Amino acid sequence: MSQMLTNVESLRGALHNAMADDSAVVVFGEDILDPYGGAFKVTKGLSTAFPQRVFTTPICEGSIVGMANGLALRGMRPVAELMFGDFITLAADQLINHAAKFPAMYNGRVTLPLVVRTPMGGGRGYGPTHSQSLERMFCGVPHLSVVAPSIFHDAGKSLRAAIASAQPVVFIENKLLYPLRQQLHSTATLQHEFLDAEAEYPTVRLRNFGAGNSPDVTLITNGGISRFLPSLLQRLSDEEIRLEALIPASLSPLPPIAPFAAAAANSGRVVIAEEGTTSNGWGAEFAARLYESCMGKLACPIVRVGALPTVIPAAKQLEDEVLVSETTILNAILKVFS
Amino acid sequence: MSQMLTNVESLRGALHNAMADDSAVVVFGEDILDPYGGAFKVTKGLSTAFPQRVFTTPICEGSIVGMANGLALRGMRPVAELMFGDFITLAADQLINHAAKFPAMYNGRVTLPLVVRTPMGGGRGYGPTHSQSLERMFCGVPHLSVVAPSIFHDAGKSLRAAIASAQPVVFIENKLLYPLRQQLHSTATLQHEFLDAEAEYPTVRLRNFGAGNSPDVTLITNGGISRFLPSLLQRLSDEEIRLEALIPASLSPLPPIAPFAAAAANSGRVVIAEEGTTSNGWGAEFAARLYESCMGKLACPIVRVGALPTVIPAAKQLEDEVLVSETTILNAILKVFS
Amino acid sequence: MMTASPNFFTSTDQTAEHFYAQMLLIRHTEQQFLQLFAQGKLNGTVHTCIGQEASAVAVVNALDLQRDVIFSNHRAHGHFLAYCGDVEGLLAEVLGREGGVCGGIGGTQHLYTRNFYTNGIQGGIAPCAVGAALAEKMQGSGAIATVFLGDGTMGQGVVYESMNIAALWGVPILFVLEDNGIAQTTPKQQEHAGDLTTRAQTFGIQTFTADSFDPLALHATAVAAVGMVRQQQCPAFLAVSCYRLGPHSKGDDTRSAEEIAMIEQRDPLRHLELQLDPQQLRQIQQAVEERVRLAVEQVLERPLVATNTTGLTIGRGEE
Amino acid sequence: MMTASPNFFTSTDQTAEHFYAQMLLIRHTEQQFLQLFAQGKLNGTVHTCIGQEASAVAVVNALDLQRDVIFSNHRAHGHFLAYCGDVEGLLAEVLGREGGVCGGIGGTQHLYTRNFYTNGIQGGIAPCAVGAALAEKMQGSGAIATVFLGDGTMGQGVVYESMNIAALWGVPILFVLEDNGIAQTTPKQQEHAGDLTTRAQTFGIQTFTADSFDPLALHATAVAAVGMVRQQQCPAFLAVSCYRLGPHSKGDDTRSAEEIAMIEQRDPLRHLELQLDPQQLRQIQQAVEERVRLAVEQVLERPLVATNTTGLTIGRGEE
Ligand SMILES: Cc1ncc(C[n+]2csc(CCOP(=O)(O)OP(=O)(O)O)c2C)c(N)n1
Ligand SMILES: Cc1ncc(C[n+]2csc(CCOP(=O)(O)OP(=O)(O)O)c2C)c(N)n1
Ligand SMILES: [Mg+2]
Ligand SMILES: [Mg+2]
């Protein structure tokens, strides 16, 4: 099999192709022009290829998304970049009271094909205002989608789907995933498949065991946490623990719960891991729905893991302590397994 | 017993007393000066009594909360009003990346005694951008409290507690509660008590049945939904369904789960009702925690009710359809009861 | 001469009587809203533009209504009627009856028709308008965008972000400041330091000023501003000084009787009346009264909007 | 004459040699950060103020450091050191060693000491600074607040909201624009239309301008601005034109070699060197070098900050 693309390559390629395929696609953001090409280089090369449709903006996240709303209302397909996901708070009004409102409150008579791309996540020592995973705030907002590919998704394909969507999408990238290679196929030790390959934003199922066996534990996670999985699945395999991991790309709305509930009932043991804090997090809704569908079928409570409920410190050892690690997840799995 | 105060009277009195007791308390907001006294009249009389410490502001919600942050850092006790809760999106950055960050990221060396008061909720035909219940977005934000008194709480006392708190509080008022009288004591048909009377923001327990009996159903709810309870408890009583309602004033962090779990295990049947949308709502976290603590003790899945996942329409009949009503809750109770 | 045909309101005639007729239609419709509210037939709220009709009519008539894009705010009825004359669509929307322009979902503050958009968040629409204008420029449609902002709304930072981008990128947008000197209950002097028009100038935006007391002169200024925006593909800022004759929304007027009496002296409708032939005046008045009366009657007979309205079920709402 | 005592840095002497010493201390410390980063000893990032030291030193020395309040941003090391001279506290903070001013939680962009605050969100600190200044005014402390903003940060609307309120209410705050002509990689002409200083003027704010190439003249201007703010209890705006000699953060400099060479000609440190006695110069240089070298050595010997840091467990964090 040919060498897989890294996430940043995949996203970059998708932006290029989307712009080449559709002259309505416009890209905005701070410092995105070549030669710099954006703080995380996702837009690298874009302004050279499409100088008329790539705009570097002043520093004003509210208006970046606001402008994108207006462009979307008038027939364009804007893709706005917020340099750090933490700054999405500045665009909250445009996302919630504008983007997510216009189509519905105008009784479906307008569409709003907006994509707001932004990198979330810690692990780089950037400190409290440059490391958060704030996407949970936008999960559950009616008429707004929140999408986050993992390394087991084709990130570029997810981005193309978001750009093609008629409704606004908050598209979460994870800083630590950018340089990692996507892993889209099974390997000798890891079964990779899509639960719903035809879905707009499909869910990945990974297993560290072969057909005919059933899983010991079900792990539900998304986005950046996927970086721990290749090693984690291997370690668990060494311990002869059969893990099935389910990784939806659509964080909100949640994909239909049935296949997740079936998987949970099958193993009876569930861990949900997310990069942000767990209280009122993405996993809270997931857990609540799983419990609803799995009454009497779980051997033990679902364990949710996420960041400690505090700020994300700058100092490495403090940051490591606050954020989820492979070990945190492993311990949660061992806990439900025992 | 003397006539109870309405919610707006209670809140207004608390603001008066807080200002009289502590010259560090300052109050800000749009159109809050007399004779108007604010869109919902909570600040009525305040600027006449304390002309030097009550400020009407330009229309700039971000800076209203931003200023309050600065005042709080420098020894004052600001109480900021956002005219409608929907506008809290404009203050999201100041709440999340400033108020909730300063004390922790400065290693506990500053305090930030901020209160942001704002009315949430629909039912008045104000339409999609003036009717939402967006507090769920701020639930789970570390180092930030979200407080919402019900009609069974002393709203003014809750507000005083928020003003006395060393950390930032988003204080949710409900538009429809303002004119309603608080109900702080038991009546012939309704037992009122506090689960934790000494808590900063206590939880109310209501029962439509006498001692010695156990409940059929547990209802967990908050804020504006409490307006349905006097009638609902009566109706259920007529149907001989024993309901225990638990109404925390602290939406985030959640109060200790143990007494809620005990109540849930006792009845085995739980309904959670909130005014906002349920997906990723306040109730999702509550449900997840209850399930965790009540494995095998619930007779049926928890039913969560809330607004339909869409915008809140202006037209009355549409709005009624989208929002939670007494009937929605009643049906949910009958559902878990059967 | 003005005819009483139902679409006289959308004729492109730009005369005193035409403006008067449009302004009067707005005035009557707004008064109906206040009355319907008082009668308990209107759920929610309305912000009427009574006293400010000239601004709506004079500015909107300066636009190319086939293609230009308009963004307005909470006080949008005048802009809406000047744009499309759809009295029934507006009434039905605000009264929650069938045939409302947004199926009753939006209501008074959230209107949409064709190229006309409003929202209830002060200032938030400004960058949307910049984006819309940029879209038109990129598509080469020749259209411009116009955004109406109140003086109080100039407190929102996003307006300055928008002016900066519009000026920086040469975006064809007209910012219209409807300066009625008050925001809800707060006089402008308690909202703003310095001068609002020069704020726009410091972004390198050309500014125009006019008084709504003279609708024809205001219109001429608006035509000049619109022409500049369209030809030079750059923003302009038009400050319209005007007066709000009615309350902010319903009964919430804290201004003194003297102040209101003074404001009534500045009613542009009365001013225009002096310029018109009395007979023509009566004819217009009758025609408009009839138009609005019939519209109200007709809309009140319509059923309440059905609850399966599409807007509520699209996309995410289907879950 | 300047002595090599560890606290020469916080003396209140306002002479060329004193300024030079402070600026050089900042320069050396910043260079250490870049070097430590290159050596892999610094986790995360830093934004150094190399080239802009004069602005920090000249403005901060115009304040009353016993009581005035300072708000700064991502590029805060110079302001911080000019304020308190705590090289070790800063180094330890950024290196995650014990004794950092924020226990290693904040890191380079989130510093706090006494009356000095920073945050990593561009512009968001501006209304906080207005609130702080208002608090001082209400408390009658006689203190003022100062907030440092970059030219790029003037893109944020919240800055205009802040200027409006400050001017409207007579809040004693000095807005300092550090105009280095660039924001990350974007030149000012691609960030802004019109002129930044006149923007402040339109809020009725008095403005001052100065060039960091001449630190003593800049200082005199800052003293005048601070004096006005304190005496008249109103805002002022001080635009400092300066140059960023180094990269935005680490290696991210997309400017041409010629441009950098041109900027090096504008290095205020070199300029000051010409004004000092060569022997004195050497003495200062040796003292500063020694000070920074020892501080780095000493801090690198400290243990990494322990994980039970209090900041993480306060309030909500205890859950
Ligand atoms: C973001 C936001 N803040 C506050 C309000 C509440 N509000 C509605 S209209 C209004 C006053 C607006 O004043 P101005 O801009 O002068 O317009 P006018 O009402 O005078 O037409 C206010 C404060 C709002 N709708 N949106
Ligand atoms: C709200 C926000 N948006 C974007 C950024 C990312 N960012 C950090 S510094 C910077 C450039 C700031 O430029 P300027 O204000 O001129 O300050 P300078 O770096 O030149 O000192 C940007 C875009 C940020 N930290 N906060
Ligand atoms: Mg006004
Ligand atoms: Mg700069």
Image: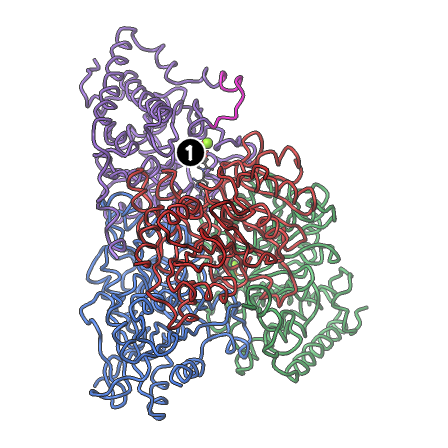
Chain colours: A blue, B red, C purple, D green
Quick check: C144 left or right of B275?
left
- Chain under numbered label 1: C
The residue where tag 1 is placed is C177
Badge 1 crowding class, 10 Å Cα cut-off, few under 14, some 14 to 19, many 20 or more, is many
Q: Is residue D174 magenta?
A: no
Disc 1 residue type (three-letter)? Leu
Q: Which residues make up the magenta segment?
A: C252-262
- Looking at the image, is A9 positioned above or below residue C204? below
Picture mark count: 1
Q: Splitting the image into 4 quarters, where does residue C283 fall?
A: top left
Q: Nearer the viewer, residue B208 or D136?
A: B208
Q: Which image quarter is the C terminus of chain D in?
A: bottom right
Q: Nearer the viewer, residue C102 or A291?
A: A291
Residue at 24% of width from left, 72% of height from top? A259
Q: Position of residue C9 (x, y in %)?
A: 23, 23
Q: Nearer the viewer, residue B108 or D70?
A: B108
Quick check: A256 left or right of B297?
left
Q: Position of residue C59 (x, y in %)?
A: 33, 29
Residue at 47% of width from left, 42% of height from top? B177
Q: Which image quarter is the N terminus of chain D in?
A: bottom right
